Image (cartoon, rainbow, N blue to C red):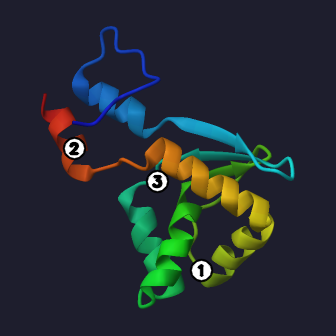
């Protein structure tokens, strides 16, 4: 079962709770002082990333996957990644402290994601 946290459940239906959960944003500050806002990306973001970096190198894809969670850096919005140059620019912008903080934040807030569990939550 998906755990829905940080969401007012008052009069929300399970589907509304799942949508609220999916659109939550979290902010993390890296060791260099950058604030990175993350939110769960839609499935299209994963397809775009695969297209941008060429979906052949599984290790490279795994390294890039947390990047699609970045919504803003220091309050400046980050556009969806569509090209390898955009991926590399975001990596450069985040630098090592940002990449470490991003990986930890994605794992902490979205690590237990499961489409099957989300679908079961919506059915209830």
Please give the name of the residue rendered at 59% of the width and 52% of the height, measured from the top-left corner: 104
Does 81 sit above or below residue 106?
A: below
Local packing at callout 3 (Cα closer than 10 Å; few below 14, some 14-19, many 20+) is some
Label whose residue precedes the other's in the sequence (2 or 3): 3
Local packing at callout 1 (Cα closer than 10 Å; few below 14, some 14-19, many 20+) is some
Q: Is residue 8 left or right of residue 63?
A: left
Please give the name of the residue rendered at 43% of the width and 21% of the height, measured from the top-left corner: 7
Q: CA distance from mark 2 to mark 1?
A: 31 Å
Please give the name of the residue rendered at 41% of the width and 91% of the height, measured from the top-left corner: 56
Local packing at callout 2 (Cα closer than 10 Å; few below 14, some 14-19, many 20+) is some
User: x%, y% of residue 45?
Assistant: 45, 64
Identify the residue position indicated by label 2 in the image.
117
- Labels 2 and 3 touching (C-beta < 8 A): no
Identify the residue position indicated by label 3 in the image.
41
Q: Secondary structure at mark 2?
A: helix
Q: CA distance from mark 1 to mark 3?
A: 17 Å
Label whose residue precedes the other's in the sequence (1 or 3): 3
User: x%, y% of residue 120?
Assistant: 15, 39
Quadrant assignment for the C terminus: top left
- Labels 1 and 3 touching (C-beta < 8 A): no
Of badges 2 and 1, the one in the foreground is: 2
User: x%, y% of residue 33?
Assistant: 86, 47
Q: Is residue 29 left or right of residue 17?
A: right
Q: Is residue 60 left or right of residue 58?
A: right
Q: Secondary structure at mark 1?
A: loop
Of badges 2 and 3, the one in the foreground is: 2
Q: Quadrant of residue 46?
A: bottom left
Identify the residue position indicated by label 1 in the image.
83
């Amino acid at each position: 079962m998906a755990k829905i946290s940080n969401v007012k459940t008052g009069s929300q239906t399970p589907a509304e709770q799942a949508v609220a959960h999916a659109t939550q944003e979290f902010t993390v500050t890296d060791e260099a002082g950058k604030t990175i806002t993350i939110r769960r990306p839609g499935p299209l973001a994963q397809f775009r990333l695969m297209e941008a970096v060429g979906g052949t190198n599984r290790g490279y894809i795994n390294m890039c996957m947390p990047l699609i969670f970045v919504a803003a850096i220091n309050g400046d919005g980050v556009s969806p990644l569509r090209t390898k140059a955009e991926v590399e620019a975001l990596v450069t912008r985040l630098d090592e402290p940002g990449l470490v903080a991003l990986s930890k934040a994605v794992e902490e807030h979205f690590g237990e994601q499961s489409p099957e569990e989300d679908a079961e939550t919506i059915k209830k």
